[in-house]
Image (tube, coloured by chain):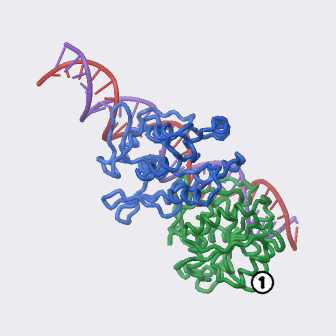
Chain colours: A blue, B green, C red, D purple
Amino acid sequence: MTSHILLLEDDIQLSDTIKQFLELKGYKVYTAYDGLEAEEIAYEKHLDLMLLDVKVPHINGFDFLKQLRDEGKEIPAIFITSLNSVEDVEKGFALGCDDYIRKPFALKELLVRVESLLKRSFGTHEERIVLGDGLLFDIKELSLTQDGKKIGLKTKEIKLLSLFLQHTDTLLEYKTIHEALWEYDEKPSAGALRTYIKRLRAVIGKEKIETVKNIGYRFVK
Amino acid sequence: MTSHILLLEDDIQLSDTIKQFLELKGYKVYTAYDGLEAEEIAYEKHLDLMLLDVKVPHINGFDFLKQLRDEGKEIPAIFITSLNSVEDVEKGFALGCDDYIRKPFALKELLVRVESLLKRSFGTHEERIVLGDGLLFDIKELSLTQDGKKIGLKTKEIKLLSLFLQHTDTLLEYKTIHEALWEYDEKPSAGALRTYIKRLRAVIGKEKIETVKNIGYRFVK
DNA sequence: CTCTTATTGTATCGAATCTGAAAGATCGAG
DNA sequence: CTCGATCTTTCAGATTCGATACAATAAGAG
């Protein structure tokens, strides 16, 4: 499953370098050269991680992240900064960034941080999501319980549920879901997804997953 | 109750970064830039955790920890190291460090380790774990007894059991288990693990180890 | 409104994959 | 060589996957 990364960086040369490097490592990279572009991408795309330069045109990295956090988005973020002042680092962490890296940096160092965050992005400690109806999904344990009783879910169902929980109230296109559930080279028919949607609905309630005809599905709380 | 952390790190910039970050998370941080300073702090202050770089002036991290351990101090320690060799990691563990982290690392990753170690050290220092059915596992002796009678376990089985006992009710992925049982360069087939699971089940009871298909196993109390 | 058509939901079942169990191969120590 | 620990192989049974067929539903045309 490819991780999708937003790179907000106005230095075109640096941006290209990072993009090239990360793509070589198998990530999907969206580049934005200013805060407005970043906003657009954040709304349109599913993102797993953000690399944010602070000093960029229109909306700076701090404000951009603050805005996202205010909307409840928990996408992990790393600040790229050439600023050295204590305040900036503190401000960054206060805003809920997960790490930061100082310019100039070795690409390898960046990779370490990216990988480390992605690995842990899915909640490190007892992340449990309440689904109502006595249903609890434990992300770390990959287990679903109802009133304390375990409900057996198969791997594909778990993947699907995880995806939905990461993007509640968001329209997920068929393509997006397929990318999340299957590898590049796998090409199951469209019917396969329908099967899993049906199974999930049977477990968590039909009304939780809306159908958007011709486009995809949406999980509602 | 604030936890007190000693940070031994001679790279001033990194040290500042870590200090800032941990203080933001509510810890009290004492910084030392060489082994002698660290000694001083260790004598004067009450410490809950130590973060030790290995390569620092005067007294290196290894020697510093060894000294403390020789004096009977059990303060948990994490090595910060840029060294990659297996030996150094082993040496660290032999000296009684509890974890290590390689530079460069994401601050969040450091935080995870700090928190988990602090939590653990507050937890019980029990020497024996009751497994029911008259079964007792002695952590220090690494031996299993049933109704006082010793049950012979092979090293791999003991490692596996220890791992499970340190992570009860936790989903352990194949990868995790493999890393715990085998060295970096060893690559036994998946069948090997299945063999040990089977043996352990025969000893401690089938129901204690759950299978999570495609992912791993989980030990339940 | 009714019919048509495209899309989505449901049920089923064989194929592929995974796990557990057993047996035997390998390897090193003594 | 023998023994014991470790690991591999094999195979059967269980589970999961996903194709397929068909039913239900939504949307649009007339």
Q: From the viewer's perspective, tell me whether residue A125 is left or right of residue A192.
A: right
Q: From the viewer's perspective, tell me whether residue B178 is left or right of residue A73.
A: right
Q: Is residue C1 above or below residue A161?
A: above
* Place of residue B92 in the rendered image (x, y in percent of width and height, measured from the top left): 76, 70
Residue at left 53%, top 52%? A76
Residue at left 51%, top 57%? A96
- Of residues D27 and A189, the one nearer the viewer is D27
In the picture, the quarter occupied by the N terminus of chain A is: top right
Q: Counting other residues with Cα less than 10 Å from the Cα at mark 1, is it few (<14), some (14-19), or many (20 or more)?
A: few
* Place of residue A93 in the rendered image (x, y in percent of width and height, measured from the top left): 54, 59
* Place of residue D27 in the rendered image (x, y in percent of width and height, measured from the top left): 26, 27
SS for dot 1: helix
Write down the chain letter for disc 1: B
Q: Amino acid at mark 1?
A: Asp
- Of residues A179 and A33, the one nearer the viewer is A33
> On the image, numbered disc 1 is attached to which residue?
B70
Residue B135 visible to an observer of this rendering: no
Q: Is residue D9 above or below residue B120?
A: above
* Place of residue A180 in the rendered image (x, y in percent of width and height, measured from the top left): 50, 42
- Of residues A209 and B177, the one nearer the viewer is A209
Residue A165 visible to an observer of this rendering: yes
Residue at left 29%, top 47%? A207
Q: Is residue A7 above or below residue B67?
A: above
- Of residues A133 and A2, the one nearer the viewer is A2
How many numbered discs sit on the rendered protein?
1
